[in-house]
Amino acid sequence: MLVLGVAFLSARPMWQSLPEGTGLVRLSLTHSGVRNCRARTAQELADLPANMRDREVCERRRAPIRIEMDIDGQQVFATEAAPSGLAGSGPSRIYQRIELPTGPYHVTLRLADDPSVAGFAYEAGFDINLQAAQSIAIDFDAASDGFYLH
């Protein structure tokens, strides 16, 4: 009897994580904004011991990152993510789920990590064909120059 109960409950109730005929696009990334740095003056350098004469001095806190995501020309997500950590010295983290009906889409992404520079440092566009119950993840890697799908 116990075996039949376990067998029944393993098949019921029917559960789906997404509604019928929809897929999922997930934006999930971790990226560090730039640090605010300034050049030291000649007087500041002269006042320091020889082993501490770095030409630049940078704040510990990192800049927030800005990200925008458009699907078929319509903005579906835009945010500014603060750096993590008590001192604001860690990376910014973003996670966003977007459920869409199945079909073809053009996804455009933009990311800015330096508030002193106008516009976006990274931009990418992808054509996707979303299937029912499919999950497409969008990630970011600055070393490989931007966004990628997996």
Image: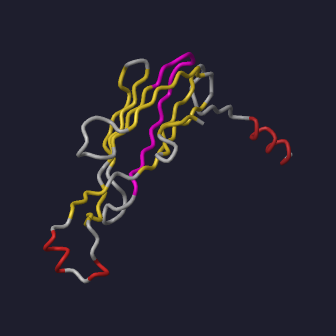
User: Residue placed at 31% from the left, 81% from the top?
Assistant: 51
User: Residue placed at 29% from the left, 78% from the top?
Assistant: 52
Left or right relative to 115: residue 9: right
Residue 123 vertical placement versus 43 (above, below):
above
Toward the left, the furthest residue is 43
Residue 64 vertical placement versus 19 (above, below):
below
From the viewer's side, name the closer residue of 29 and 110.
110
Q: Position of residue 6 (x, y in %)?
A: 79, 45
Q: Quadrant of residue 150?
A: top right
Residue 68 belongs to magenta span: no
Q: Position of residue 100 (x, y in %)?
A: 50, 23
Residue 109 vertical placement versus 94 (above, below):
above
User: Residue placed at 83% from the left, 48% from the top?
Assistant: 2
Q: Position of residue 104 (x, y in %)?
A: 55, 16
What secondary structure predominates along the stretch shown in magenta?
strand
From the viewer's side, name the closer residue of 65 and 97.
65
Residue 98 belongs to magenta span: yes
Numbered range of the magenta stretch: 91-107
Toward the top, the furthest residue is 103
User: Residue placed at 26% from the left, 67% from the top?
Assistant: 55
